[in-house]
Amino acid sequence: MESRIERLCIERGLKMTGQRRIIGRVLTEATDHPDVEELYRRASALDARISIATVYRTVRLLEEKGILERRDFGGGRARYEASAQGHHYHLIDAESGRVIEFADPALERQLHQLAARLGFDLVSMRLELFGRRNTVAGEDRPAHAERRETVARDEQGSALGGLPRR
Amino acid sequence: MESRIERLCIERGLKMTGQRRIIGRVLTEATDHPDVEELYRRASALDARISIATVYRTVRLLEEKGILERRDFGGGRARYEASAQGHHYHLIDAESGRVIEFADPALERQLHQLAARLGFDLVSMRLELFGRRNTVAGEDRPAHAERRETVARDEQGSALGGLPRR
DNA sequence: ATACATGCAAAATGTTTGCAGACTG
DNA sequence: CAGTCTGCAAACATTTTGCATGTAT
C-alpha cells in the first residue's frame, strides 16, 4: 500500500518510481532523524537497486516540495524528518547524542513576536538545545513532562561538549 | 598593540606567532560572522604568509579555548565570531542573508527552564530565526527596536526560502 | 512519446592531517 | 632547547553533477 509520503508525492505530481516509493516508505516509517547514509542503508535493505545519488536527489526534492525538513544537529551531515504540522524543537543530549523532540506553543508565539518586533515575518527557524542530563541527587524527577512529545532515539552517538563539530 | 583576542590567547598560554597575531586582529576587528575563507582573505591582506590550513587550525583552537564561537547559518560553511559575554541570537534576513543579532534575557531564561523541565542542564544552544522583512503598507515602523543590539552586515548574500542549503 | 529519474563515476566543497622545517617561550 | 606551530599537498567526508540509459505518465 501507499505510504504517507508517497501520497504527498503523488499530490504534488511527482513521478513514483520504485526507488522513490521505497525511500518514501523508509521516511514514513522513520521515527528518528536519519542522515542520507542511514536512509540509503535502510532503503537498500528493502531494495538493493538504489544508489546513494538517488537518495541525495530525492531528499533534496522532497525538501523543496516541503515534504521533508532538513536538520543539522552538528556532525556535518544533514538529517531529515518528515514535515510535521506543528512546529517542534530538539534537545540534544550532549553526552549520548540522543535527540528529544518537544513542542512549546508559547515559545513559538514568543519567537514570532520577537521577529515581528525586529520588523520581520518569521519564515522558518532553527532551535536546538544541547543539554546534559541533570542528575541532581535527591531529586525525584517530578512529572514535568507536560511538553515532552516524542523521544526519538537516534543511532549516532557522540556530540559531547558544546556544539558538536563535524 | 595587542588585540583583545591576542590578550586572551596569551592568558591561556598559547604561543603568539605572527600568523596568530594577524588572525587574532582580524577576528577582534570583525563585526560580522566571517567564514574561514573570508578570514583567510582578510588575514592575507595584512600578511600574505598565512595559509588557509593555519586559519582552520587557529579557529578550531580558539573555539576549543572558548575564545571563539562557531556558527552555522546554513550554506555549509562554519562561521565564527568572538565569544561574547551575554548570549545573543541571530535573525537572518531570508532575502538578503543579512544577519541581525539580538539578545533577549527573558527568552534565555525561558529556554533554560524548558530544558530543566525536560531534565537537562542547558550546555549550549542554537537559535536562528529566518525572516522576511515585513513591509506592511501604511505602517510607520515604530520604535520597536528595544532589543535590537547589533546589525552586522554579512558579506554573503542569498539565503532565500527556508533554511538555505549548502 | 516525452519529460523526468536513475546509476555510475567524476567533480566540487569544506575541512583535516602527515610531514619536514621554523619559531616561541 | 623542547614543544608548538606552519606551509604544503595529499587525504577525507559529504554532497552535487554530467552523461547515457531507463521509465512513468
Image (tube, coloured by chain):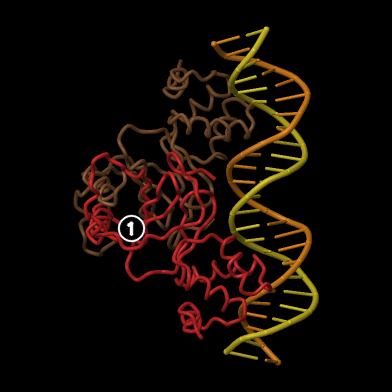
Chain colours: A brown, B red, C yellow, D orange
Q: Quadrant of residue B109?
A: bottom left
Front residue (pair A128, B96): B96
Observer-nearest of B41 and B134: B134
Q: Position of residue A37 (x, y in %)?
A: 57, 40
Q: Residues within 10 Å of mark 1 (few under 14, many from 20)?
A: some
Rendered image quadrant of residue B87: bottom left
Q: Residue at x 29, y 40 (%)?
A: A149
Q: Is residue B12 left or right of residue A136?
A: right
| Vertical placement of residue B95 versus A55, above or below | below
Please give the name of the residue rendered at 67% of the width and 68% of the height, measured from the top-left corner: B51
| Relative to A130, residue C9 above or below | above
Where is residue B56 drawn, in percent x and y? 59, 65
Q: Is residue B32 left or right of residue D9?
A: left
| Image quadrant where one finds the C terminus of chain A | bottom right
The residue closer to the viewer here, A166 or B11, is: B11
Residue under pointer 1: A133
**For the point 44% across and 21% down, which residue is it?**
A3
- Spot occupied by residue A120 in the image (x, y as percentages of width and height): 31, 46
Count of number-bearing discs: 1
The numbered mark 1 sits on a residue in which chain? A
Percent position of residue A70, x then y? 46, 40
Which amino acid type corresponds to the residue marked 1 in the rendered image? Arg
Above-or-below relation of C25 to A24: below
User: At numbered mark 1, what does the secondary structure look like: helix, strand or loop?
Assistant: strand
